Image (tube, rainbow, N blue to C red):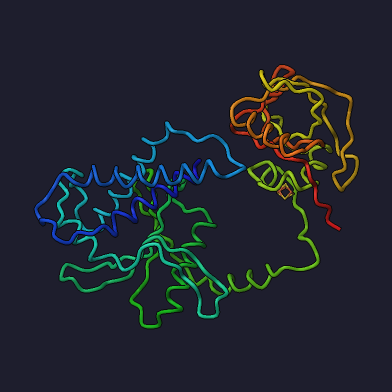
């Protein structure tokens, strides 16, 4: 849902930056709120359809629309600041203001690619920073961020690196470019965070060399930070399970588990699950005989029933099941997938 929200906000800002202003009166005001909301709503509905057509999905949160609106407002605040109109309220923004903004947009949602095709990035906005006389001062690579604001004003290393890479790819393709600034535009606090530093091209090319497919699997690094977070591959990875069986992981109420469903009532969503342990390193399943009540609801129930309807009969991987008072609850936030570990060999 967070990713969908980001897509919606990004797309609605692109719409605002590419809207047709021809024939509009420069003095017209009071249009920005309604136009912004119209674009946001259109993108919301588009994204909702894509979301519902995605087999592995959590719950669509209709109640998050105001959050998307707030994020869009944050992005608009930063755009107005960029054209030196920070104080102006949305209902006072004129078509003339927006024309000025459009005149400063060099590209929206463009692909960045090195000449040798090895590195690429997706640019949200490339803007022209000008002085009071209108002379070009620099290019600004502005990357809209709808996630959490950097703690203490410091960009996370991976975001910092990403922004510098965009800057460097752009520079490598435009030898006569003016100075290029790379910025993260955080919609949550309408804060702009600049990434500064030496070129990262050499390190990026080194990483590119290292990521070529090979016959040898990358070494697994199970741990709280890697598997404990939101790794999407758990249903296919035997490593986290073995690590957990050997005592790894925290004692949270939310657990990733592998179970055999012994009984299921599709009316109530209730059933009985037998807990499993890894029989070996490859993730072969060992039923433990330990049974517990399990309850599927909302999207968790739908996902289970889709899986059962597809003919699946074996063990289930359940991501983030809520384990409390001897019952296991599988709700809209959970992954429910066939347990299909891929051995390293
Ligand atoms: S679950 Fe597997 S693939 Fe995911 S982080 Fe852990 S070891 Fe790596």
Res 210 → quadrant:
bottom right
Tally the numbered discs. Answer: 0
Left or right: 180 in relation to 57: left
Residue 211 vertical placement versus 303 (above, below):
below
| Residue at x 89%, y 25% (from the top left corner) | 289
Name of the residue lying farthest toward the bottom = 175
Residue 136 vertical placement versus 27 (above, below):
below
Left or right: 342 in relation to 252: right
Front-lying residue, 251 or 263? 263
Locate the C terminus by quadrant: bottom right
Left or right: 39 in relation to 34: right
Where is residue 141 drawn, in percent x and y? Answer: 38, 64
| Residue at x 70%, y 48% (from the top left corner) | 233
Where is residue 97 drawn, in percent x and y? Answer: 17, 56
Res 23 → quadrant:
bottom left
Left or right: 274 in relation to 235: right
Where is residue 332 drawn, in percent x and y? Answer: 59, 31
| Residue at x 49%, y 66% (from the top left corner) | 121
Where is residue 195 drawn, in percent x and y? Answer: 43, 61
Front-lying residue, 231 or 301? 301
């Amino acid at each position: 849902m967070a990713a969908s929200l980001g897509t919606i906000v990004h797309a609605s800002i692109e719409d605002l930056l590419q809207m047709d202003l021809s024939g509009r009166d420069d003095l017209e005001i009071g249009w920005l709120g309604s136009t912004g909301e119209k674009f946001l709503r259109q993108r919301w509905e588009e994204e909702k359809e894509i979301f519902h057509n995605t087999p592995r999905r959590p719950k669509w949160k209709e109640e998050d629309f105001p959050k998307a609106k707030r994020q869009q407002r944050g992005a608009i605040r930063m755009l107005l600041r960029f054209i030196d109109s920070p104080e102006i309220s949305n209902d006072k923004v004129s078509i003339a203001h927006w024309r000025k903004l459009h005149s400063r947009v060099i590209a929206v949602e463009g692909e960045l690619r090195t000449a040798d095709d090895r590195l690429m990035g997706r640019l949200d906005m490339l803007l022209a920073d000008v002085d009071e006389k209108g002379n070009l001062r620099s290019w600004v690579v502005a990357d809209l961020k709808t996630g959490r604001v950097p703690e203490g004003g410091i960009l996370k290393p991976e975001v910092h690196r990403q922004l510098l890479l965009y800057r460097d790819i752009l520079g490598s393709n435009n030898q006569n470019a003016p100075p290029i600034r790379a910025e993260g535009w955080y919609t949550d606090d309408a804060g702009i965070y600049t990434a500064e530093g030496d070129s990262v091209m050499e390190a990026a090319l080194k990483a590119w060399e290292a990521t070529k497919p090979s016959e040898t699997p990358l070494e697994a690094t199970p741990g709280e930070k890697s598997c404990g977070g939101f790794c999407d591959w758990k249903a296919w990875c035997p490593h986290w399970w073995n690590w957990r069986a050997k005592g790894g992981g925290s004692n949270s109420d939310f657990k990733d588990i592998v179970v055999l469903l012994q009984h299921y009532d599709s009316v109530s969503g209730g059933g009985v699950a037998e807990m499993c342990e890894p029989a070996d390193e490859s993730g072969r399943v060992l039923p433990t005989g330990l049974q517990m009540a399990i309850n599927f609801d909302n999207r968790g129930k739908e996902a289970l029933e889709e899986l059962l309807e597809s003919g699946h009969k074996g063990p289930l991987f359940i991501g983030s099941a809520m384990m409390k008072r001897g019952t296991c609850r599988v709700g809209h936030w959970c992954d429910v997938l066939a347990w299909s570990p891929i051995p390293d060999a």
